[in-house]
Image (spheres, rainbow, N blue to C red):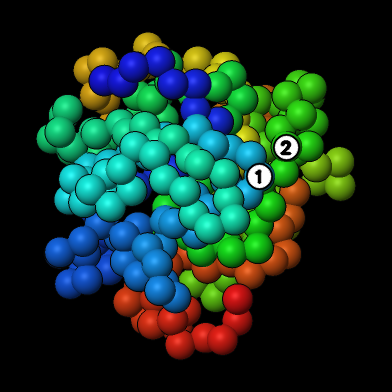
Amino acid sequence: MLSPFDAQAMVLAAGRGERMRPLTDLAPKPMLQVRGQPLMQWPMQALARGGCVRQLVNTAWLGEQIPAHFGKCITWAGLPEVEIAYSHEGQDFGHALETAGGIVRALPHLAEVFWVVAGDVFAPDFVFAPESVRRFAASTALAHLWLVPNPAHNPGGDFGLSPTGQVLNLPKGAEACQYTFSTIALYKKSFFAASGLPPGNPEGIALALAPLLRDAMDRGQVTGEVYAGAWADVGTPERLAQLNASDVT
């Protein structure tokens, strides 16, 4: 798939974006324009700002458009040069591998501790701080999630958060299920041992991430914190239009 790369971050960009149709009939969802640039470029630039200069992007739906735009090396004004590797799930298997399947596919080319962020989430102020990586690497947790207060489109929430920073596997709609997963997280490679898939996922098995996270939460292996900055899951054409009409940066 790839030559050795040791990426510090993975940007998820393989999804079909069904709810964004017809906009995604002609472009991958992460390539839709937000405030003058592709949506996925926002987290890529933020990662570069935090020193993550080796980034891995997975592709599937209309995936050839992404490397055609970014190439293998790119420099944005005021930021260090970024090397980009690609995991072409669509080319290799004919379909996207879902989040966990895609990460395991890329695992041999990721650092021991690495960031993951969805390419269709807008969080322009998020800081991918090296100190967060060091603190997480020194902890016993296998995953560390950034959570946001439940937005209007997900009032029942995803998870709870204990006073000690443990992310809690709670039923949607439970009183303490006050947070939604931002998609921004740090992982250790060992987290994905529970997937049952070999590193590199050579058979291209599609696997969801949420069940792995919930099982790890029940084992006390997932920590988290609340992110209070601007955040939007760009899940519908209406939300995309709102972002582009907003003066908030």
94 lies left or right of 213 = left
Q: Estimate how packed mark 2 is, as few (under 14), some (14 to 19) or many (20 or more) residues with alpha carbons within 10 Å.
A: few
Residue sitting farthest toward the top: 198
Q: Estimate how packed mark 1 is, as few (under 14), some (14 to 19) or many (20 or more) residues with alpha carbons within 10 Å.
A: some
Q: Is residue 103 above or below residue 179?
A: above
Could you tell me which residue is drawn at 53 percent across and 58 percent down?
77
Residue linked to disc 1: 50
Could you tell me which residue is drawn at 72 percent across and 43 percent down?
129
Task: Give the amino acid type for the residue marked by disc 2 in the picture.
Answer: Pro
Task: Count the marks.
Answer: 2
Task: Give the amino acid type for the residue marked by disc 1 in the picture.
Answer: Gly
Residue linked to disc 2: 130
Marks 1,2: beta carbons within 8 A: yes
N-term mark: 1 or 2: 1
Q: Secondary structure at mark 2?
A: helix
Q: Work out which quarter of the rendered image holds the C terminus and state it.
A: bottom right
Image coords of residue 113 (percent x, y): 61, 25
Residue 117 vs residue 174, the one in the foreground: 117
